[in-house]
Amino acid sequence: MKRIVLFLAVAVASIAVEAKTLVVYYSYTNNVHRIVAELTKQIEADVVRIEPAEKGLDYAANNYAIGSAQISAIRSNPDDASSYPEIDAVDVNPADYDCIIIGAPLWWSNMAAPLQTFLFHNGAAMAGKKIGLIVSSASSGIREVEGDAKRLIPDGVFLTPSLWIRSSQTSNAASMISEWLKAINYSEISGIEDMSPDQNPAKYTIFSVEGRFIGRDMLSLQNLERGLYLVNGKKVYLNN
Ligand SMILES: Cc1cc2nc3c(=O)[nH]c(=O)nc-3n(C[C@H](O)[C@H](O)[C@H](O)COP(=O)(O)O)c2cc1C
């Protein structure tokens, strides 16, 4: 019995999980920027900040007139690329990630226009990816922002619930984020908890990345060579 337990501990320690997360966000007054800074203290992720191509716009002037005009243009013609404000080029390939977390300010009930531009051009490439949504607003509810995300990423696998952080709650973001990560089972998505030795090893089913059945429990790892495998559908790299 002791030998089996020892072997399981070695097998568990030898797995490194491959899941990768991208955080993509826009922020005008830096609330979402601060939220993302807290988020990336809690998870490993690559981070991309969207920037409008036109610099120095005052979105708050004249009762938020510029943002209002941009949102109206998208609402009137959501399928036309020219409805979306131009943004700086972004060097990121969504295909490289398993999970994509979107950090969005709310503008006039919708997702901030520059972030919509990014998703208009990249949302189709996020098909099948796990999508998390964090929204910051002064007070308005986030249902329409969720609607925008679903329209722009039609085949995303949305994690529920979304996280809504009001501007006034930005300084509490750390605890709200950690609760949210638990609520969406983020540790399972990233694959880390699955490898815990206190779980029943018999629950694991192992395939080669080409889909060849290899074994139904952790003990099968004993016979595996170094390389990539699928354990319960997740890619893992065996280092031993
Ligand atoms: C153009 C514009 C429109 C906005 N419209 C709303 C709104 O309809 N409801 C609301 O609660 N907050 C609204 N806000 C406030 C932002 O959602 C809020 O300040 C948010 O925290 C901004 O995030 P940021 O600092 O990352 O840009 C608006 C802000 C801007 C710039």
Image (spheres, rainbow, N blue to C red):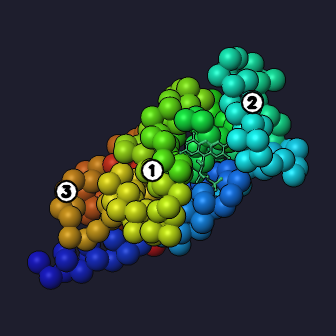
Label 2: element kind: helix
The residue at label 3 has a CB less than 8 Å from ligand 1: no
- Looking at the image, tell me whether mark 2 or mark 3 is earlier in sequence order: 2
| Mark 1, residue position | 164
Three-letter amino acid code at disc 2?
Answer: Ala
Give the number of the mark in front: 2 or 3. 2
* Rendered location of residue 177, percent (x, y): 43, 62
- Looking at the image, tell me whether mark 2 or mark 1 is earlier in sequence order: 2
The residue lying toward the viewer, choosing from 39 and 173, is: 173
The residue lying toward the viewer, choosing from 122 and 203, is: 122
* Rendered location of residue 172, percent (x, y): 45, 68
Give the number of the mark in front: 1 or 3. 1
> Counting other residues with Cα less than 10 Å from the Cα at mark 3, is it few (<14), some (14-19), or many (20 or more)?
few
| Mark 3, residue position | 202
Three-letter amino acid code at disc 3?
Answer: Ala
Kindly check if marks 2 and 1 are in contact, taking CB atoms under 8 A apart as contact. no
* Rendered location of residue 43, percent (x, y): 50, 66
- Identify whether 144 is placed above or below 90: above
Label 3: element kind: helix
Look at the image and tell me in which quarter the C terminus lies: bottom left
| Mark 2, residue position | 69
- Identify whether 182 is placed above or below 52: below
